[in-house]
Amino acid sequence: MVDHFGLQDKVVAVIGGGLGMGQASCEALASVGARACVIDIDPERADNVAAKIRAAGGQAEAFTADVLANDGPASCAAAVVERCGRIDGLVTIVGQAKFGPFLDMTREDWELDHRRNLAYFAFCAQAFARQMVTQGDGGAITAIASVSGTQSAPNHAAYGAAKAGLINLVRSMAVELAPHGIRVNAISPGSIRTPRLSSPEMAKVIAESLVPFKRQGRTDEIASAVLFLTSQMASYVTGHNLCVDGGFMAQYILGELKPS
């Protein structure tokens, strides 16, 4: 059987791999032969995901790291190299929004949303890309952005600004790292049903009024996009932001969404 993914025994680190979209991405990568490095701030979550993957016959390693700390990104990359010998891919799934009116936003709110949605990615990507450059045989970096970074983000403006910056950073990195054979892409999820956004009330609102598919997305649907962009199936794709949103952005761009 032809291996279309080209990820057999490749070392792919997933930051935020302990739950939700991160867990689903680790499982998807391992299912096609990758060695999934499950990185999470919670050691129990990382261990549980790695154990589940190994029990299913896949390859997985668990790592604990706080990538928001100043030395977190470099230490995380070094730990992966020490245990696995190399880095072939990086997926970053860390982020959180603080909701509230723009007029009430504080400097601390702004800095926190940028640290946990943009700054950490910049320095994680830098640390892992440096290793890829040293290895000399390319790699793939995939960042989870958000549809809030591609349109207005009322009541979570700092988050939207940070995700917009992330998407632009991905494009800049893609151009700079292309000579090294490193591809850099982003995925902008719409509303995805995760442990952090799983209330029946929210799902009903999303399904009935916002998404053409009339439902929230699933974590495995984001994982499929991660798998594609990390794999050789996307060997000529870089600097791209892939919206996985059930058609939300399409109707918004066309002006068909009429908020009450």
Image: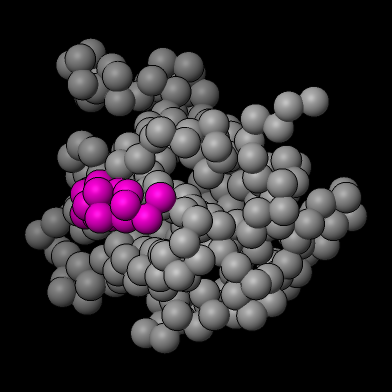
Q: Residue 200: percent from the left, percent from the top?
A: 57, 36
Q: Residue 43: percent from the left, percent from the top?
A: 68, 75
The secondary structure making up most of the magenta span is helix
Residue 49: which quarter of the image? bottom right
Quadrant including the C terminus: top left
Q: Specify the farthest residue to the bottom.
A: 71
Front-lying residue, 223 or 147: 223
In the figure, is residue 76 to the left or right of 111? right
| Residue 123 within the magenta-colored segment of the rendering | no
Residue 257: which quarter of the image? top left
Please report the residue visible at 60 percent of the width from the left and 75 percent of the height from the top: 81
In the figure, is residue 171 to the left or right of 8? left
Front-lying residue, 199 or 21: 21
Residue 227 sits above or below residue 122 on the image? above
Residue 89 visible somewhere in the drawing: yes
Q: Specify the farthest residue to the front.
A: 136
Please report the residue visible at 60 percent of the width from the left and 57 percent of the height from the top: 12
Front-lying residue, 259 or 135: 135
| Residue 175 within the magenta-colored segment of the rendering | yes
Front-lying residue, 145 or 240: 240
Please report the residue visible at 30 percent of the width from the left and 25 percent of the height from the top: 249
Q: Which residues are magenta?
A: 164-181
Q: Residue 104: percent from the left, percent from the top?
A: 15, 64
Residue 221 sits above or below residue 84 on the image? above
Please report the residue visible at 73 percent of the width from the left and 67 percent of the height from the top: 61
Q: Residue 203: percent from the left, percent from the top?
A: 51, 32
Residue 213 sits above or below residue 104 on the image? above
